[in-house]
Image (cartoon, rainbow, N blue to C red):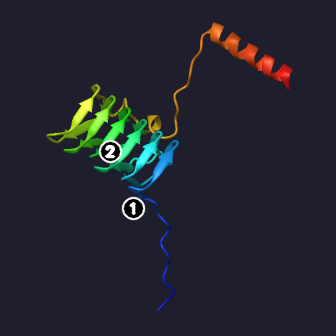
Amino acid sequence: MGVPVKKPFSTENITTLISKATEITGDLHFSGVLEVEGKIRGNIYADDDSSAEVRIRECGLVQGEIKVPSVIINGLVEGDVHSTQHLELAAKARVIGNVYYHLIEMVMGSEVNGSLCHRSASELKPAQIGRNKPQILANDDELDVVEEVREDTAQEN
């Protein structure tokens, strides 16, 4: 009889719960499974983890964008939803925004107030999910204004 060997810790089967009484303001980055029964006022991003899943429960509310490989919605989402693998809209799902999906399952009673946009797996690769944020591009006039504001601020200090 030897000493038992400990297995390395894995976050694959870990579930994070945002309970009914919880409200989060700000972006949320996670891996594993995220269950939302409360309110999130911000974007939800999965870490570069192809098995990540978010579940918005019947009483859950998300005011922001969701970018997660697998998404199950049975509550209210006010923002765009991006799913690279599987998207399920349950009977009480309400999405106010565009839905970008590879595979979708909609149950009678679910509602989307926006566009349904099919994407191939190559168009929605995991590198586009996670922490990659869109870059804001400005024209030359806007950049000049930013430089002037920086110069004015520097002179005041």
State whether residue 83 appears in this view.
Answer: no
Q: Nearer the viewer, residue 133 or 59?
A: 59
What is the residue that sits farthest to the bottom in this orientation?
1
Q: Nearer the viewer, residue 92 or 31?
A: 92
On screen, 118 above or below 46? above
Residue drawn at x 30%, y 35% is 95
Which x, y percent locates residue 87? 28, 41
Which x, y percent locates residue 91? 19, 44
Residue kind at label 1, given as amino acid type: Asn
Q: Sequence-wise, which precedes: disc 2 or disc 1?
A: 1
On screen, 138 above or below 52? above
State whether residue 90 appears in this view.
Answer: yes
Residue drawn at x 63%, y 11% is 142
Q: Nearer the viewer, residue 132 or 16?
A: 16
- Disc number at residue 71? 2
- Image quarter hosting the C terminus: top right
Disc 1 marks which residue? 13
